[in-house]
Image (tube, rainbow, N blue to C red):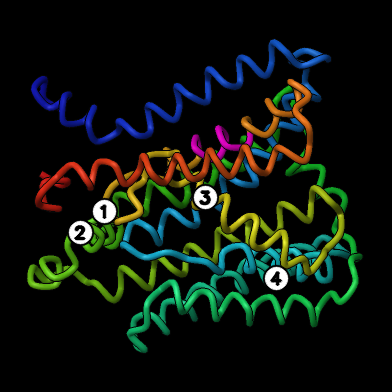
Amino acid sequence: MARGDWPYRLREHRGTLLALAAFGVMFAIYATNHPAGLNANVANTAANKGVLLAIVAMAQTLVVLTSGIDLSVGMVLVLANCLASTIVVGSPLQVALGVVGVLATGALCGAINALIVIVGRLQPIVTTIATGAVYYGAALALRRVPGGDIDGTLGDALTGKLWGWLPASLVLLLALVLLVWLPYRRSEVGRAAYAIGSAEVAAYMSGVPIRRAKFVAYTLSGLLASVAGLFITCITSSGEASAANGNTYTLYSIAAVVLGGVSLFGGSGSAIGAIFGALMFRTIGDLLFVFDLEPLWQPLFQGVVLAAAVCLGALRLLRVRNRLDLYG
């Protein structure tokens, strides 16, 4: 990077850096005020909750960058949870095949969303509301009552501690960033997603592979949502077709995306920022617990934070006369 490029790089990653700084401050307050202090168990519990939302936020980011939104990510998570609690059991080979089946199902759900949006030319918000209902119906057919199980070795490997202190969930999150986000961000379809979100018509006139970019974005979104579903199964050792969980994680993923500096209008932001936005949003809930806020008031407070985040995300758009100025 040339010496004169750093102001541009700073502006480009401003949202991510702000989310990182805010999370660092909030987690420090949480750790210093926790009754048990910051020990390995407290850190592991916080990491598991934060990583779960961070994976869903990554899934949401891929679609939001294309100027879309995926309101089915929570239901794909629920479907993957119910499926994992059914087939990720048995011998090591059966467990491996079960994991592949869960991930393939998530990718298929994302691909279906993509095909409806691309071929059917329907709005993403309408499409994913409808498909989310279908995915929830499939989850309910698989698991009418909560139950099931998952391989204990896999569960411990993903939710336990490495060397007695490092949360394994953070290693999983790092692996997803290295294996999914970074290759995607540097690929042709990744760059095309940013171009589509910035100005789809201009991208089309420039020969950008719009259909392929959207298909990959939605498919990877479904894949990551299924990873989150597999992970929550490892945490709970059961499956549950809960519409409340699906809707909650969908809403929280949007909050994390905005808090992480990703523009809901597309073309700007990073999955890394969304990850720190998710960790920050989860830490808000932990802070409410540490400071003993009445539980009935916690959803209200989180809702206020979400509304404020969305307003701040739109503030920059309101200050410009030409939307193209956002990408100059």
Residue 57's tag is: 3
**Mark 3 or mark 4, which is nearer the start of the sequence?**
3
**Mark 3 or mark 2, which is nearer the start of the sequence?**
3
Q: Amino acid at mark 3?
A: Ala
Q: Nearer the viewer, residue 212 or 200?
A: 200
Q: Quadrant of residue 76?
A: bottom right
Q: Which residue is mark 1?
A: 267
Is residue 131 visible from the viewing direction of this image? yes
Q: Is residue 9 left or right of residue 79?
A: left
Q: Position of residue 183 (x, y in %)?
A: 37, 51
Q: Residues within 10 Å of mark 2 (few under 14, many from 20)?
A: many
Q: Which residues are magenta?
A: 276-282
Q: Which residue is mark 4?
A: 79
- Image quadrant containing the C terminus: top left
**Mark 1 or mark 4, which is nearer the start of the sequence?**
4
Q: Nearer the viewer, residue 100 or 13?
A: 13
Do the CB atoms of the residues marked 4 and 3 lie less than 8 Å apart? no
Q: Is residue 256 above or below residue 203?
A: above
Q: How many marks?
A: 4
Q: Distance between the Cα atoms at labels 1 and 2?
A: 6 Å
Residue 195's tag is: 2
Quick one: SS at disc 2? helix
Q: Is residue 202 left or right of residue 259?
A: left
